[in-house]
Image (cartoon, grey):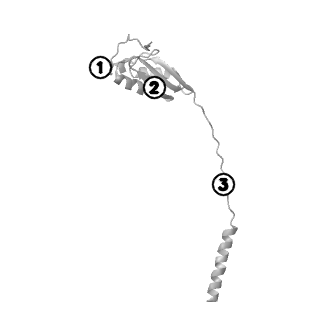
Amino acid sequence: MKKVILSMAVIAGLAFTSCKNEAKKEIKTTTTEVSVAAVKTNLTFGVRGNCGMCKMTIEKAANSVEGVSSAVWDVDQKKIDISFDDGKIDAVVIHEAIAASGYDTEQVAGNEEAYDGLPGCCKYDHAMVMNVSND
C-alpha cells in the first residue's frame, strides 16, 4: 500500500512540476484607430412633383445613390435637401438619379419614359416653379 501511495505522490509531483515549468505565452495586440472624416456636403435644389407618392419616389431615387446620407423632398416648396459625401460622388449624379425616376430637377430633365409610367397624381406640370421660397 505504501508503494501505491508513494507512486501516486511521485506522479502528482511530476504533473505539478511540469505544469509549473510550462512557458507562459503572452500575446500582445495593438489597436490603431484610424479616423476617416467623411466630408458631408449639404445641397438644396428644385425638383418638380405633386404629392406624397412623388416624395417617396424622389427620396428613394436620391437615397439610392451611394454616398447620400439623407434626402428630404418638400412637397410645397418643390425642393430637396440632400446630405452627401462629396468625396464619393458629384452632385450631378444625384440629379441624374432623380431624373431617371421621371422627375425634373434644376439641372436635369426627367426621363420621359419614366415620367409616362408615373401614377396620374404624379404627372406634374413641366413648367412648374421649383425651389419655391416661403419668404
Q: Residues within 10 Å of mark 2 (few under 14, many from 20)?
A: many
**Badge 1 is on which residue?**
120
**Residue type at tag 3:** Ile
Q: Residues within 10 Å of mark 1 (few under 14, many from 20)?
A: few
Please tell me which residue is depicted at 44% across the width and 24% down the height of the picture.
72
Q: List x then y, in percent, for residue 45.
A: 47, 17
Please tell me which residue is depicted at 38% across the width and 26% down the height of the picture.
56
Give the spatial CA distance, label 2 vs label 3. Answer: 47 Å
**Front tag of 1 and 2:** 2
**Residue type at tag 2:** Ala
Say if mark 1 contacts mark 2, CB within 8 Å.
no
Which is nearer the N-term, disc 1 or disc 3? 3
Q: On the picture, is 13 further left or further right than 107?
A: right
Query: Helix or strand or loop: what does disc 1 sit on?
Result: helix
Q: List x then y, in percent, for residue 63.
A: 45, 28
Q: Looking at this rendering, what residue extends furthest in the left direction?
A: 120
The N terminus: image quadrant: bottom right
**Badge 3 is on which residue?**
27
- Residue 48 found in image quarter: top left
The C terminus: image quadrant: top left
Q: List x then y, in percent, for residue 102.
A: 38, 20
Residue 36's place in the image compared with 93, above or below, is below
Which is nearer the N-term, disc 1 or disc 2? 2
**Badge 2 is on which residue?**
71
For the residue pair 122 and 113, the one nearer the viewer reads as: 122
